[in-house]
Amino acid sequence: MKEEQHATPGLLLALTPVVLSLIILGTQIFYFGVFEPHIPLAIGVALTSCVGAYLGLTWEAIRAGIFKVIHVALPSVSVLIVVGMIIGIWIASGTVPTIIYYGLKTLSPEIFLAAGMVICAVVAVSLGTSWGSVGTVGLALMGIGEGFDIPMYWTAGAVVSGAFFGDKVSPLSDTTNLAPAVTGTDVFSHIQNMMATTIPAMLIAFLIYIGVGYFVIDAQSVSFEKIEGITTALDENFTISGWALLPALVVMGLALKKFPPLPSLFVGVLVGGAFAMAMQGQSLQAVFDYANNGYTIETNISEIDNLLNRGGIQSMMWTISLVLIALAFGGALETTGCLKTIINSIKSKARSFAGTQAAAVGTAFSTNLVAGDPYLSVALPGRMFSPVYRGMGYSTLNLSRGIEEGGTLMSPLIPWNAGGAFVISALGLGISGNNLENLLYIPLAFACWTAPLIGIFYAYVDWFSPKATDKEREEWESSGADIAKFNKDGSPVPD
């Protein structure tokens, strides 16, 4: 279909639907105390469509742009569906209960947060998906934290720090492959370049969690009677055995063999279902029900019932509907040119490499904020800033690292983003009514927000900020890559 010609929105007009939508969203969450971003974002789609009509776009063109963006991000919806199945099945198979049981028996409150972060990072690197790590091992860690009387938001912060950092450096991750693809670099050079921020951020988070474990959390107040009650109830309702960990080990093995994450996770559903029948005595009909509607149990121990009554495809529908509406908002903003105008405005303010790096990270974060999808937050800034880096003579590895940090790592810290919505749903944080305290997981996910700050600091002091090599310049020339030209004041010439 031929693209329609329409007027380009000015910055004020481009910002109007974004600002109004965020005001409505803030009113819904913080004034009414209801964490249901769906309707405010749907209103955002309507407002942006009105801007498009004012600019001369037909509804058919706006709708096509919305569906195009939704189509690009459908893999994330597929992962949500399979992860919902795997949560329900791995509880029924005894995999999650076994992890909780052994965790309560072997870990201590002092090292729990730091160990939990590391465990989630290892699993996410192996699986190539932060969501898979959060929904399985992360869920089990929430149970262990509950047993240790550690506030949910502390445990969730550690889980998010580890899972999304593991995703960020895994060669199996979709966003880790997307970032170098849109900036014209290769995935392994991209991962190597990210280590300069990954290692310090993880080390900072690790030390904070260790400090919290020893100096903030009162290990002496931990009720061993409560822990004993949880482990006894788990032992009475499930067959606790190291064999129950096999579904998780199978998935990790497939991932290490470079099988795609989605089929690997689905194999985990099948193996988990078999173990639920063979080890836990479940029927085939019950397994199908757990995969669709989630696992159900009544132990009369609230900590176990609240944690294990979850999972299934239907439990993901709240998150999926939010993701689809947020994607529609992002698609409308992109189709009408609002998003491009905003990004160009940010880009035009940069007069130096450091300013450009900060702008790229900020743009990825802002795209996450308004578009609600980590794919868009990586792809759009990656496409738009690449010519600027080339024109400045800097390697686009700097850009791929920046958009990963502003895109992948910041997505779980925005509650209405796909990443944030999944975290809240999968970990059972219960953000509803006036119960917003669990949103404290956002500042407590230290690794996620320290990494972008470290990367921007490097840019200003010119550390770990590689210039373009001769080989890169030759590749730019041979491929006909766009290279920005600059005005006398140092600003890039607009596209």
Image: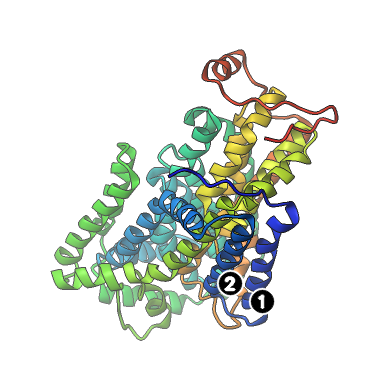
Point out residue 230 in the picture as x, y percentages from the top left corner: 38, 76
Q: List the single residue furthest toward the bottom.
A: 300
Per the rendering, the mark at residue 40 is 2
Determine if residue 358 is in view: yes
Q: Are marks 1 and 2 in contact (CB under 8 Å)?
A: yes
Amino acid under disc 1 = Thr
Point out residue 34 in the picture as x, y percentages from the top left corner: 58, 79
Q: Residue at x 58, y 38 (%)?
A: 382
- For the residue pair 29 and 445, the one nearer the viewer reads as 29
> On screen, 360 above or below 311?
above
Residue behind mark 1: 27
Q: Residue at x 32, y 67 (%)?
A: 313
Q: Is residue 220 left or right of residue 297?
A: right
- For the residue pair 324 and 249, the one nearer the viewer reads as 324
Which image quarter: residue 134? bottom left
Q: Residue at x 43, y 67 (%)?
A: 321
